[in-house]
């Protein structure tokens, strides 16, 4: 187990060295800044994979829907930590908005699209509980509308009042949904194929739960520390390499979604589309309901309004995504065609990220 946790040791060493030489790196020019930036991003990705492992083990121990809740919550915590730190050290007013938008694009179009394609090629039509997708999409429509569509119409003098309202309503929605997901309608988020038997992994069963919880928490803390160093290098790197403004947001979303992507792809290959739906839609919903309150709190404490109102292009992409998800996920099963439709939107998102500089 210690050998597998070498990324944590590497992260600790990188953090110590990074804090010691970060100012020297900034003055070292393109080579120094670029190399350090890539190294830190690589280490963060490596730790994110360990987050995925520990979340998967806990998911196996606790079962559904708790399993995917642990995984998506871990990913969202990583995203919130990185985003909060980068926001406090960045001059990009739309970083939070672009990160939430990118996360939704990656989770719904990327994860479900690719999973439906590879799962469909291997298993044909893959079934899941229709109640789960309906519940997630309804909550996503409301939460995205309140937090990202409506702010465009809120007068400048009323932004603080609306920020407080947004924080309160997002937390209420999350609390209600969490209660429904774990108590009254827990069966919405499970799908058991006839005759299927889930065999626990012997290696996972041999390790105490407390060890995985502790290592997961330590991994998130180290990601936060490395994000602090990354935030110092972000602006110089963007200027030196002419990085598009949306790239930092996409980077945060991708790093936090890394564990989810791996887990979802493995689930699709095992014909477990319910897990894919729970991960992709659950992560999107958790991103909105948990990230937005943190962002609004930062805005209230700093006294500076953070731009959460989406652009016309982002609005069009979100509406297309939700509409495609509603149509494709209406019958309790996915196939290759539905995967290709969602992946086409994901490809469009990638192209627009570089085209709209």
Image: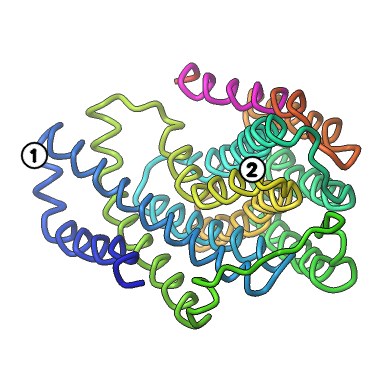
- Residue 126 falls left or right of residue 351: right
Write the residue at 80% across / 50% down: 136
**What's the distance in space between the residues labelled 1 and 2, CA to CA?**
46 Å
Residue placed most toward the observer, 200 or 23: 200
Residue 328 image point, x, y percent:
83, 31
What residue is disc 1 on?
A: 28
Residue 209 image point, x, y percent:
53, 80
Image quadrant of residue 337? top right
Residue 87 image point, x, y percent:
42, 50
- The reply to whether dot 1 and dot 2 touch (C-beta < 8 Å) is no
Q: Residues within 10 Å of mark 2 (few under 14, many from 20)?
A: some
**Secondary structure beneath label 1:** loop
Image quadrant of residue 316? top right
**Secondary structure beneath label 2:** helix
Q: Main secondary structure of the magenta part?
A: helix
Q: How crowded is mark 1: few (under 14 residues within 10 Å), some or many (20 or more)?
A: few
As drawn, the label of residue 175 is: none
What residue is disc 2 on?
A: 269
Q: Is residue 134 magenta?
A: no
Q: Name the outermost residue toward the front.
A: 195
Count of numbered badges drawn on the protein: 2
């Amino acid at each position: 187990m210690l050998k597998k946790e070498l990324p944590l040791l590497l992260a600790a060493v990188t953090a110590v060295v990074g804090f010691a030489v970060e100012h020297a790196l900034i003055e070292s020019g393109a080579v120094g800044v670029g190399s350090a930036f890539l190294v830190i991003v690589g280490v963060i990705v490596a730790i994110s994979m360990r987050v995925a492992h520990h979340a998967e083990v806990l998911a196996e121990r606790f079962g559904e829907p708790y399993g995917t809740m642990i995984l998506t919550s871990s990913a969202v915590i990583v995203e919130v930590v990185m985003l909060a730190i980068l926001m406090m050290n960045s001059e990009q007013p739309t970083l939070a908005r672009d990160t939430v938008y990118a996360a939704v694009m990656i989770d719904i179009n990327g994860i479900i699209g690719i999973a439906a394609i590879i799962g469909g090629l291997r298993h044909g039509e893959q079934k899941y509980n229709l109640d789960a997708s309906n519940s997630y999409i309804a909550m996503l429509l409301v939460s995205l509308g309140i937090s990202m569509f409506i702010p465009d119409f809120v007068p400048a003098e009323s932004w603080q009042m609306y920020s407080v309202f947004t924080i309160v309503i997002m937390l209420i929605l999350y609390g209600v949904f969490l209660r429904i997901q774990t108590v009254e309608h827990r069966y919405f988020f499970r799908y058991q194929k006839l005759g299927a038997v889930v065999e626990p992994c012997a290696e996972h069963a041999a390790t105490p739960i407390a060890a995985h919880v502790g290592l997961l928490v330590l991994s998130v803390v180290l990601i936060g520390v490395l994000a602090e160093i990354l935030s110092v290098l972000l602006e110089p790197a963007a200027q030196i390499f002419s990085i598009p403004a949306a790239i930092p947001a996409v980077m945060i979303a991708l790093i936090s979604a890394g564990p989810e992507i791996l887990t979802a792809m493995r689930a699709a290959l095992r014909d477990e589309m319910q897990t894919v739906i729970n991960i992709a839609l659950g992560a999107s919903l958790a991103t909105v309901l948990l990230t937005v309150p943190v962002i609004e709190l930062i805005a209230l404490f700093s006294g500076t309004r953070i731009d959460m109102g989406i652009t016309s292009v982002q609005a069009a992409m979100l509406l297309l995504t939700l509409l495609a998800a509603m149509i494709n996920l209406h019958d309790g099963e996915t196939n290759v065609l539905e995967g290709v439709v969602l992946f086409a939107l994901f490809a469009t998102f990638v192209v627009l990220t570089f085209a709209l500089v």
